[in-house]
Image (cartoon, rainbow, N blue to C red):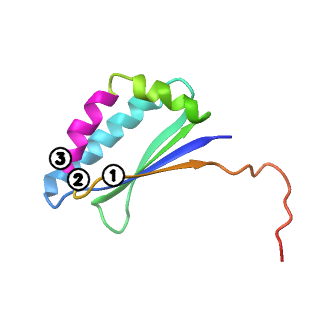
Amino acid sequence: MVYTITVHLRANSDPASVDKLKAKLAEASRVYRKDKETLDWFVMQSVHDPRDFTIVERYENEGSQKYHLENPYWKTFDPYVIPLLEKPMDLRRFEELDTSKDVVVPQ
């Protein structure tokens, strides 16, 4: 099953932080998408509040994130991003549901 990580980030109140965070996330996506066993690594910005961002990382399996963590770029990410945030990143881990088979929804 696909292993997915979502990360919610909120930029601090400095208007420059939004642009810096947006640029860093776009750069990170272009770098991390190339990692072995990474299915996708994409970023989103809220349509209601430009300070809110979400990262969705999709890997072949939980062990696949080792390639992400071994990427030298990873060591530059937190030191740049953390000072731009209002609060710590909210990171959540998931296994995607198998939706390829027919299901019976209980009444």
Q: Position of residue 63 (x, y in %)?
A: 56, 30
Q: Which residues are magenta?
A: 74-85
**Main secondary structure along the magenta-highlighted residues:** helix
Residue placed under numbered mark 3 in the picture: 83
SS label for mark 3: helix
Is residue 56 on the magenta stretch? no
**CB atoms of marks 1 and 2 within 8 Å:** yes
- Quick check: 69 left or right of 27? right
| Amino acid residing under circle 1 | Met
Q: CA distance from mark 1 to mark 2?
A: 8 Å
Residue flagged by tag 2: what amino acid is it?
A: Leu
Q: Please identify the residue farthest to the bottom as the structure is shown.
A: 107
Residue 101: where, in percent of width, then height? 83, 51
The quadrant holding residue 102 is bottom right
Disc on res. 85: 2
The residue shown at (13%, 57%) is 14
* Left or right, residue 78 beside residue 35: left
Asked whether residue 51 appears in the rendered view, the answer is: yes
In which quadrant of the rendered view does residue 51 lie? bottom left
